[in-house]
Image (tube, rainbow, N blue to C red):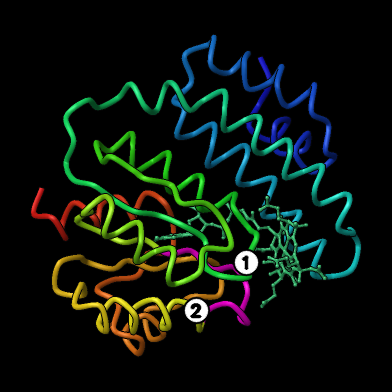
Amino acid sequence: MPTFNDLAQSVISGNLDQVTDQVQALISSGTDPVEIVNQGLIAGMNVVGVRFKAGDMYVPEVLMCARCMHSGLELVKPLLASKNIHSKGKVVLGTVKADLHDIGKNLVAMIMRSGGFEVIDVGIDVAPEKFIEAVKEHSPDIVGMSALLTTTMPAMKDTIDLLIKEGLRDKVKVIVGGAPVTQTFATSIGADTYAADAITATDLCKELVGA
Ligand code: B1M
């Protein structure tokens, strides 16, 4: 059976077949899907992040790693989803305007669903107006925003400001996250809460809806 380290290495090398085989082997052996994600897939992606920053990896290679991450997540998705059936609340979730990073957001969606939330995933590059449309259409309990770029973090504030302008701010709680986001930033833009990872995000959402 592959180790978590084997899986992380396969993500780092962008080897899609190997990632698929290893995730399937770990699932078949009864390994906790949350551990497969955290200790295998995310651990690999963390190394990719460090190498990308250092200039040791380039965008096409990172995209291969991202593809591996997506495929791995897709395989564990049904296991996470089947963990809970009663809806604890509704979350509209998206990556903010001009930001195309979706791995973390997809992971947050998956863990929230496994925690019993109904998640309406509005995708990437979501303009404030599109968040508002989704709030009007779905009446969620929570709006969740993800940003991975320092340049796109201000779009979180723009979205909260538009919620206020549209008279919707009191009707929803707002949670923000993503690598460059901090509690201080979240407080400064008027979000209700900030989470550093998907599991904390899910726990905090439960607190926000009193579940
Ligand atoms: Co980009 N990228 N990228 N990238 N990329 C970063 C973010 C960067 C930090 C890399 C670096 O330089 N070290 C850097 C940002 C610098 C900055 O702004 N400070 C960067 C850059 C510069 C760029 C481009 C501008 C590069 C270029 O083109 N020159 C470009 C921008 C494109 C755009 O968005 N407009 C770009 C492009 C890309 C790819 C397309 C190649 C690819 C994205 C593929 C995809 O998402 N489909 C990519 C990737 C993969 C990364 C890194 C390497 C990995 C991100 C990731 O998926 N991590 C990233 C480096 C890094 O973050 N260290 C980097 C794994 C994921 C599980 O973690 O998303 O942080 P994360 O999610 C976490 C938590 O943050 C949290 O939960 C998750 C874990 O449990 N979380 C939330 C996330 N959202 C949350 C929401 C919540 C709560 C928690 O509540 C709602």
Some atom of ligand 1 lies within 8 Å of the CB belonging to the residue at label 1: yes
Q: Which mark is residue 35?
A: none
Q: Say which quarter of the image contains residue 80.
A: top left
Residue in the foreground of this view, choosing between 97 and 198:
97
Q: Residues within 10 Å of mark 2 (few under 14, many from 20)?
A: many
Residue at 49 percent of width and 45 percent of height: 107
Q: Amino acid at mark 2?
A: Ala
Residue 66 in the image, given as x and y percentages of width and height: 72, 45
- Dot 1 alpha-carbon crowd within 10 angstroms: few under 14, some 14 to 19, many 20 or more: many
* Residue at 50% over, 52% down: 105
The residue pinned by badge 1 equals 99
Residue matched to label 2: 155
**Is residue 146 magenta-colored?**
yes
Residue drawn at (80%, 21%), measured in percent from left and top? 17
Query: Is label 2's Cβ within 8 Å of ligand 1?
Result: no
- Of label 1 and label 2, which has the lower sequence position? 1
Give how far across and how far down residue 204 sits, in percent: 24, 58
- Toward the bottom, the furthest residue is 188
Q: In the picture provided, is 44 more to the left or to the right than 175?
A: right
What's the CA distance linking mark 1 and mark 2? 9 Å
* Quarter containing the N terminus: top right
The extreme left residue here reads 210
From what the image shows, is residue 91 above or below residue 126?
above
Residue 55 quadrant: bottom right
Check whether the beta carbons of the residues at disc 1 and disc 2 lie within 8 A of each other. Answer: yes
- Please state the extent of the stretch shown in magenta in the rendering: 145-153
- Residue type at the position of mark 1: Asp
Which residue is nearer to you in this view: 8 or 203? 203
Tell me if 32 is positioned left or right of 149 in this view.
left
